[in-house]
Image (cartoon, rainbow, N blue to C red):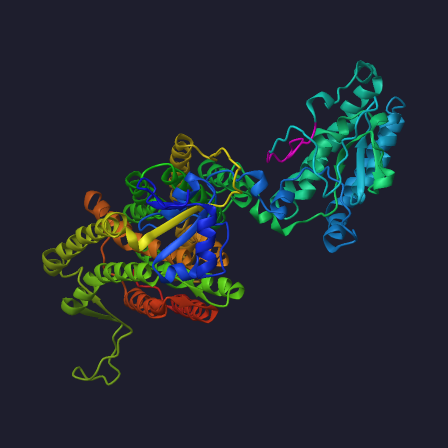
Amino acid sequence: MSEIEQEPELGVRRRSTQDALMTCSTLTQNHSCEGITCPSCLMLTKTTLLAENEVEAHKLANNYKFGFKKWKSHVTERPWEDRSAIVKELYSDLNVIKHPGSLVTCDNVLYVLLFGWWIALLYLLVALIMFVTIAGIPYGKLCCSLAGYYFWPFGKVIQKPFMNRRKSSVRFYGESAPETTAVETTALLGATDRVDRAPSETPTVGMKYWLSPSTYVWLLLGYPLLALAHGLASFIAWILVVTIPIAKLNGRAITDILLIPPEQLQIRPSKRTDVPLDGEVVLCCYRAMNFYYYKYTVFGINVFAVNLLPLVVVALVLGYADTENHYASSPVKFALSILAIIPLSYYIGMAIASISAQSNFAVGAVVNATFGSITELTFYITALIKGSRKGNKCYEEVVKSALTGTLLGCVLFIPGISMVIGGCKHQEQRFNSRSAGISSALLFISVGGVFAPTLFSKAYGNLICQGCTNSTQNESGPFECNDCHFNVLQNNALFHSHIQPLIHTVCILLPASYVIGLIFALKTHTHIYDIHISDCHVPGHSHSVVIHWSRWRAVVLLVVATVCMSACAELVSEHIDPLLSSSAISPYFLGVTVLAMVPELPEIVNGIQFALQNNISLSLEVGSSIAVQVCMLQIPVLVLFSVIYPVGFNLLFSDLHLWASIFSVILMNYIFMDGKCDYFQGTALVVVYLIIMAMYYFAPSQSSC
């Protein structure tokens, strides 16, 4: 397929592998198989990407479309042969013999200090119990051997020889695997991750094993205690992520090693000449840690999102079962609920990306517009309702601070930190200045519309001063006031006749501008986002596409995550009151930092990953798209909700919110003007963001709080 074929459904173009590689190699020497763009192509307002299949091509194209959530992770399972050696090792079953060199490393020594000594001690204790029972002496000897193994397992091989001589199943690192049935799984305590075993060679336990009294003594007195210890060690190691090899090591003990008859188990050093050819390697481990496990996924879900999922259960159970705060205080419940939002935000983003990648652009745009802001809106609405019921204006100020904090974080911090980290790997990064200009124009429209009622109120509102004193004791003398601000709420005629209609007008025009932006990017000017997609598979290799989440599964998970998000948002708004009443934390600072940026952590990670792969264009679009959604969708929805259910929300922001937002948007547009960036420009954005956060930290709270 040498000619370009148009695919209207995907809104992308596909080329043959050779053509795409020739295009990139001609224009630039910088390309990869992971959706990385060619910088020179970006200068021509065209982007060439490499995709593995049609679904991934659709997802990559959606990343470049206005109004779509930018998502880095794969929505399909990558073929095993296309993965790098580092990633393959993450999913490997610990049964491949290697020659890694020195085994005395810091991580292996740390294993002994954290796990090895007490597991070995427990084995010796169980061995003593087995010796006392007389019948369990064979298992007592096994425990003594395993005590030494689990104290220092590195470089040792646990092997189970076959009863009848047959071709060896031992494999050494670097050797090609024989014809086998390969199964990949990501279960923590599963027997295998990749099992290289012929079905006819599956070992069976004979009747002799079950007729032996020692088996029942072992299963009653020894196995439960050791299984509990290994399960605890496996859980701790899994939670730490980088120590997942230790989790696999302990999980294999529960599922395999402790259930093998002692006479069949052999522990040998990992020297090729010492391992009999007639046997099966059950377990061999060489390193306790692997820092690349941050890439590990379970059913397409990143391991960090999997590990944080129990936090959602803990937060919901404590929040709704312990209403009297007997087991946890309000600040603890607030912190747990905020942290529980992180994995839920990830699941919502993954579900949106999966649905969009398997649908046309109309469905994808609707799903992104509807659920793209659901994380923030659930908290904002519940907080406004809570503040209205309590008659506390602090909740409204926190919501406005969170909206402003999200805007500042997306305009300054996300692109800034992406430039800094990406710039450490790439000296200079280029992006499509035309598409960035469209996002900048929308941001100007958004910020101008959102803060127009505030500027209007300052022009026509009343200046209210409090805490005024006259030091001259003369009524005609000058007064010194501590707190002066414009207040239009006390002037009902001005607010209801002029400002409120302006707010409603702005909230109609902003979503209309968002819709026009969708039409511009997805229909009339698609050439600006002209994406070329090319297969990166080896010619002649065909692969069936395995989607992690089908459309219906993604819909179900999206609904469940949204419901859990609403419950967590309710808990956040319920237990934020003690923090608002504390003089140590300003409601301004709490809103612009914790409440604004914690839900955006998955987006920050996405932006950094894009930048590391030299795709800074998407890193910038991550922040811009969120900022545009805040102004053009979230704020109008809150105003509409306030009309239907009066909670007192209006678009009258403080001076600090106003000038910080306007200055940030101007600075961002100035830096993005030339279509290229480096770590110095990113540092400038991050420093400005930190300065503004310091202003919020030291800003005094309003009198209403």
The question of residue 191 being in magenta is answered with yes
The question of residue 320 being in magenta is answered with no
Quadrant in the picture for the C terminus: bottom left
Count of number-bearing discs: 0
Residue located 40% across and 67% down the image: 676
The residue range painted magenta reads 185-197
User: Against 384, is 208 above or below?
Assistant: above
User: Against 310, is 425 above or below?
Assistant: below
Residue located 45% across and 34% down the image: 549
Magenta-colored segment: predominant secondary structure: loop
Residue located 68% across and 37% down the image: 93
Residue 651 visible in rendering: yes
Residue 266's quadrant in the figure?
Answer: top right
Left or right of 418? Residue 81 is right
Give whichever of 104, 125 is nearer the camera. Answer: 104
Quadrant in the picture for the N terminus: top left
Q: Position of residue 344 (x, y in %)?
A: 44, 42
Left or right of 85? Residue 448 is left
User: Against 648, is 299 above or below?
Assistant: above
Residue 602 visible in rendering: no
